[in-house]
Image (tube, helix red, strand yellow):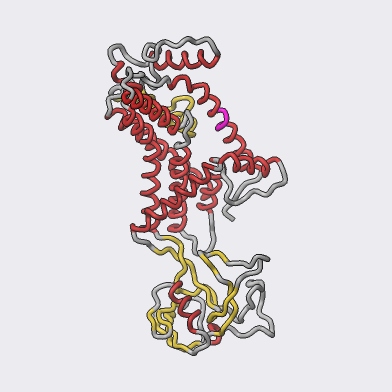
Amino acid sequence: MAYLLGVVVLVLGVLVSIGLHEIGHMVPAKRFGVRVSQYMVGFGPTLWSRTKGETEYGLKAIPLGGYVRLVGMYPTAEAVGDPPARTTFGKIAAQAREASAQEILPGEDHRAFYRLSTPKKVVVMLGGPFMNLLIAIVLLTVVISGFGVAASSTTLSAVSQCVIPAGADASRECGTGDEPAPGAAAGLQPGDTVIAYDGVEVTGWDQLSALIQQTGDRTVPIVVERDGDEVATTVTPVVAERPVYEDGVAVTEPDGSPVTHEVGFLGISPSTELQTQPVSTVPGVVGNAVAQTLGVVVTLPARVADVAQSAFGSAERDESTIISVVGVGRFAGEIASADAEGFGTVERVASMLTLLASLNIALFAFNLIPLLPLDGGHVVGALWEGARRQIARLRRRAHPGPFDTARLVPLAYGVFVLLAGMGALLIYADVVNPVTLG
């Protein structure tokens, strides 16, 4: 039941994100005088609709997208010189122009989208993607500064009974030849919260870890909180070989063996808890997420090829692979139904909001691809039209008129077929060779 609830919550979150994306297009379009005849969430048969003013608002049966119908998206045949339609592509473009022109009411040609200036067209078309980015920023702010992010705390989750040699399996049991761990010898217990070490007040795990490493083998005082009481004792770290980490990743030699150094060692492990962060950390988190997602978009063809190899061949599917709506739904279900210790309601809500934020960042980045029918394709068309006007002005030539974006409709059809094929491949891969949260 919890699994299904997670999927339902995700679907509702996606629908809200799609609806807000389309509002990002609709509001500036209406502000600039464009007539918006329809605002729809979903595709296919209409489940519900209501007309308010000159716009029909509705919900359709297939929740895989949405649209706003901006009247006059393509220039009329008269506006672009009534080009001949001799080829198949030319006929498709002519049909697109005709369909667009039929939506323009008599006397309202000035309200057609194609009549907007280049900056206004760019604002309208980027309004949708930037609405998704805004949603992601809001969600991540709630998670980071409201719920908090998972981080190591000064409360101990485990206390080792012996010193495991560097390079050995950390999960193996202690042997008779293993040196006793200092933490256990000093009486430290899981659940203790370290509040002072070597006379220094402890405020975080990174600080405590650095203090322990710098101690060497000196005997130092340590104070922990246990069951509400302060317990003071002394501890003598051992100097042990431990791996060197940089940015959380173990440094290795050319032959793959870990790089180690001698540091003070107690044999204690931190517990993980949600810790709120200042709002000032949100821009960095969002910027990093956007950069990573744009990197995925740039390498999309190669990633799709990798998915195909894992779906139809013996190649193992990478955990960082791209996934479909089916895979995202599985993630939502796994988050909602997870029963791991320490993963309660707060952690589930925070994880679900993070998942929705990631989806909105993906929608933002994906819609910037400069190909029709994506928003980025319309932006490129508008910028090209503006560039033509500026060049004509500099050369003191006649106004070139609007760019005939209808000629790009055949390309848009091709891109749509490719996107549909990619979606089908990802869905198939998520069924036969799924990625799970582990």
* The quarter of the displayed image where residue 224 is located: bottom left
What residue is shown at x 62% (from left), y 50% (from top)?
A: 318
Q: Is residue 115 left or right of residue 256?
A: left
Classify the position of the C terminus by image quarter: bottom right
Which residue is outermost to the right? 314
Q: Position of residue 418 (x, y in %)?
A: 57, 31
Q: Residue at x 68, y 49 (%)?
A: 316
Residue at 33% in and 57% down: 279
Q: Can the viewer see residue 419?
A: yes
Give the main secondary structure, helix, strand or loop, of the magenta stretch.
helix
Asked whether 419 falls inside the magenta stretch, the response is: yes
Q: How many marks?
A: 0
Depth order, front residue of 334/167: 167
The spot of residue 2 in percent (x, y) is 51, 50
Q: Nearer the viewer, residue 96 or 312?
A: 96
Query: Is 57 situated above or below 204?
Result: above
Tell me the magenta residue range: 416-420
Check residue 347 for magenta coloring: no
Residue 382 location (% of width, % of height): 38, 28
